[in-house]
Amino acid sequence: MTRVLAVPLLGSPFLCWGTLALLVFASRGVRLTISLLSASQENTVQLTLLLLLASVFFSGFFLPVTVFQTPATEVTFALPVTHAIIALQDMMLRER
């Protein structure tokens, strides 16, 4: 991203990789929880796709988290990808 899109990385690359690793582990944990609580494989796939859509729309990737009202904000901060996006934006775009 830093070479192709010319996005500055003002933070540590190790913190960036660590944040991405934590995101992967947290996302796997959420998917594992969904698969443990689901009754069938079809139900697991449907719930995982709903989680994917919620992660895309409510994570702050397209819209800032501050524009959501209270019920949507609670959903937003329950998703691990929201915290990863906030951390990556902080590392890549803000000087310290």
Image (spheres, rainbow, N blue to C red):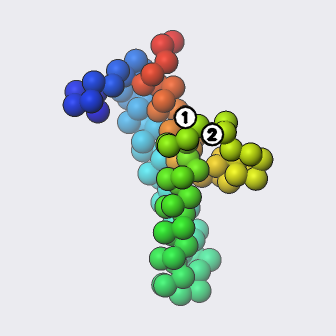
Name the residue at 70% across, 52% down: 72
Residue 62 to residue 33: above or below = above
Q: Please tell me which residue lies in front, 86 or 24.
A: 86
Alpha carbon of mark 2 to alpha carbon of mark 1: how far? 9 Å
The reply to whether residue 78 is in sight is yes
Element type where label 1 sits in the image: helix
Question: Where's the N terminus, which quadrant?
Answer: top left
Image spot of residue 25 (x, y percent): 47, 53
What is the crowding at mark 2: few (fewer than 14 residues within 10 Å), some, or many (at least 20)?
A: some
User: Which residue lies under the disc numbered 2?
Assistant: 65
The reply to whether residue 32 is in sight is no
The amino acid sitting under disc 2 is Val
Left or right: 6 with respect to 19? left
Residue 80 to residue 87: above or below = below
Name the residue at 38% across, 36% down: 17
Image spot of residue 80 (x, y percent): 56, 49
Do the numbered discs 2 and 1 sit on residues whose CB atoms are within 8 Å? Answer: yes
The amino acid sitting under disc 1 is Ile
Q: Please tell me which residue lies in front, 94 or 25.
A: 94
Q: Which mark is residue 86?
A: 1
Q: Earlier in the sequence, mark 2 or mark 1?
A: 2
